[in-house]
Amino acid sequence: MGWEERDGALWKSFRFADFSEAFGFLTRVALHAEKVDHHPEFTSVWNRVDFRLTSHDADGVTDRDHRLAAAIDAIADQ
Ligand SMILES: C[C@H](O)[C@H](O)[C@H]1CNC2=NC(N)=NC(=O)C2=N1
């Protein structure tokens, strides 16, 4: 896992070999997010992707964020 819960959100950074790897990972995360209708906030800088997961409707962390965090970890491990 390695997700940090603070300020009403789950946070984690991922690093990849290069921008192409990072963007491919983000694309797979985006397809998953559309499927489950729960979407991450993220910033990306070259080979790094930083996520912030929160449920806007609940104004905080819910099971949907924990499930999305687990799914993002699984995609990163593929
Ligand atoms: C209408 C739709 O179900 C909502 O807007 C969904 C879409 N994706 C979402 N993503 C996140 N992270 N939080 C939400 O509350 C949320 N709501």
Image (cartoon, helix red, strand yellow):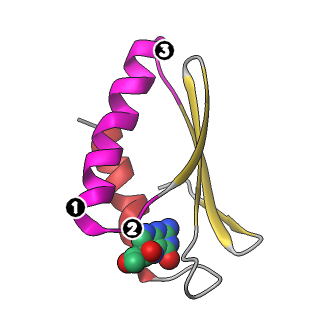
Three-letter residue code for mark 2: His
The mark closer to the camera, 3 or 2, is 2
Residue 35: which disc?
1
User: What is the spatial separation of the Cα atoms under label 3 and label 1, in whole angstroms?
Assistant: 24 Å
Instruction: Check residue 8 in the rendering and tell me which mark sits there, or answer none.
Output: none
| Element class at badge 3 | helix
Q: Residues within 10 Å of mark 3 (few under 14, many from 20)?
A: some
**x then y, percent, for residue 33:** 33, 57
- Identified by mark 3, the residue type is Phe
Q: Secondary structure at mark 1?
A: helix
Q: Quadrant of residue 22?
A: top left
| Residue 70 coordinates in the image, percent (x, y) | 36, 60
Is the residue at mark 2 in contact range of ligand 1, meaning its CB lies under 8 Å from it? yes
| Residue drawn at x 26%, y 67% as measured from the top left | 36
Q: Does residue 20 show up magenta in the picture?
A: yes
Q: Residue 38: give its label.
A: 2
Find residue 69 and report its horizontal and vertical position in percent: 43, 60
Name the residue that disc number 3 marks: 19
Task: Give the alpha-carbon distance from disc 1 to disc 2, as whole Å.
Answer: 8 Å
Q: Residue at x 28, y 58 (%)?
A: 34
Above or below, 36 relative to 75: below
* Precedes in sequence: disc 3 or disc 2: 3
Find the distance from the CA under tag 3 to the CA under tag 2. 24 Å
Q: Is residue 65 visible?
A: no
Q: Amino acid at mark 1?
A: Lys
Nearer the observer: mark 3 or 1; the answer is: 1
Magenta-highlighted residues: 15-39
Q: Is residue 29 above or below residue 23?
A: below
Q: Which residue is located at x 58 percent, y 77 percent?
A: 56
**In which of the image's four quarters is ligand 1 placed?**
bottom left
Q: Mark 3 or 1 closer to N-term?
A: 3
Q: Are marks 3 and 2 in contact (CB under 8 Å)?
A: no
